[in-house]
Amino acid sequence: MTGFGAFLRKELIEIRRTWRVWVIPAMLVFFGVTSPIIALLTPALVQSMTASQPGVVIKLPPPTALDAYAQFLKNLNQFMLIAVVITGAGVVSGERSAGTAILALTKPLSRRAFVVAKILSQVALLVAATTLGTVVCLGVTAVAFGAANEARLVTMVALWLLYAVLLIVVMTLFSAAFRSRGAAAGSGLGFFFLTLLLSTWGPAARYGFVGLMPAMRDALLGEEMTLGWPVTTAVAAIVLGAAAAVRIFERQEL
């Protein structure tokens, strides 16, 4: 891949010097801090809301570290995946509309290297930010509840990260296929909600990558998991999706 190393370094430097270095990491650190706090305060908040309603009594069990981890997973699935979709929508289409893709590709840089560097730079940012956010969540949870079940959180986040990497690849494919950032974002959201729907269907969850979603909950609860098919199909989808993104971009007119 001609020019891959130099272009990847350029992408990583660009991430460090632009708003992208703050958005994803800041959100993950924020959720790492607030998830344990929300879990700790939820019973008191529920009691205060029902205190003014005679005859209504809601008793919640004392919160635990698992409640903090569950809140963290909820934030990852509800907010972070949508953030991945939105930030990834313009990764190729934005460069094309701004004209910077043509400038880059007039140099000794192949289109394959262009796409692969885009994917790897996004993955590097997400992995680093997710690691930071998870460490923060573990630390705050230990202060609030005491250290407990750390392995469950790590396993849960690893499964989430595998799905998030797949979503990055899918968004790069859509961004290469569509000139409009909005079309890419809309397609990405459609893919995300479709996988959510399919994850509730037994055969799809058992034999497809959508099984990563229920597997995250199983990891959190410490239940037995069968990860062979979900992980294998996720890795295969990442490889095939990246190859498809390269192929589509090679056929596109700039």
Image: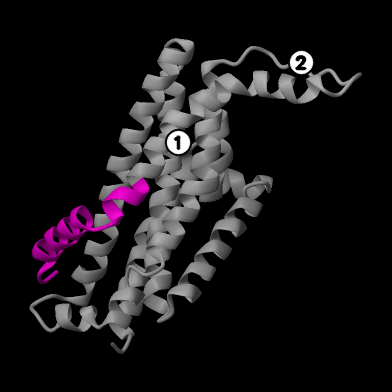
Numbered label attached to residue 177: none
Residue 182, compared with residue 141, is above or below; it is below
- Identified by mark 1, the residue type is Phe
Is label 2 in contact with label 1 (beta carbons under 8 Å)?
no
Residue 74, compared with residue 122, is above or below; it is above
For the question of whether residue 90 can be seen, the reply is: yes
Point 30% across, 72% down: residue:
246
Image location (x, y in percent) of residue 78: 55, 46
Numbered label attached to residue 59: 2
Position of the C terminus, as image quadrant, is bottom left
Instruction: Tell me which colouring the rendered structure shows.
Output: one colour
Say whether residue 226 is left or right of residue 245: right
Query: Observer-nearest residue: 183 or 143?
Result: 143
Please name the residue that numbered disc 1 is placed on: 31
Question: Residue 117 lies in what quarter of the image?
Answer: bottom left
Point 50% across, 33% down: residue:
72
Residue 187, compared with residue 31, is above or below; it is below
Point 15% across, 57% down: residue:
13
Query: Observer-nearest residue: 244 or 57?
Result: 57
Task: For label 1, count other residues whose C-alpha is less than 10 Å away and answer few (under 14), some (14-19) or many (20+).
Answer: many
Image location (x, y in percent) of residue 163: 45, 48
Q: Secondary structure at mark 2?
A: loop
| Region in magenta | 1-24
Say whether residue 128 is left or right of residue 152: left
205 part of magenta stretch: no
- Identified by mark 2, the residue type is Lys
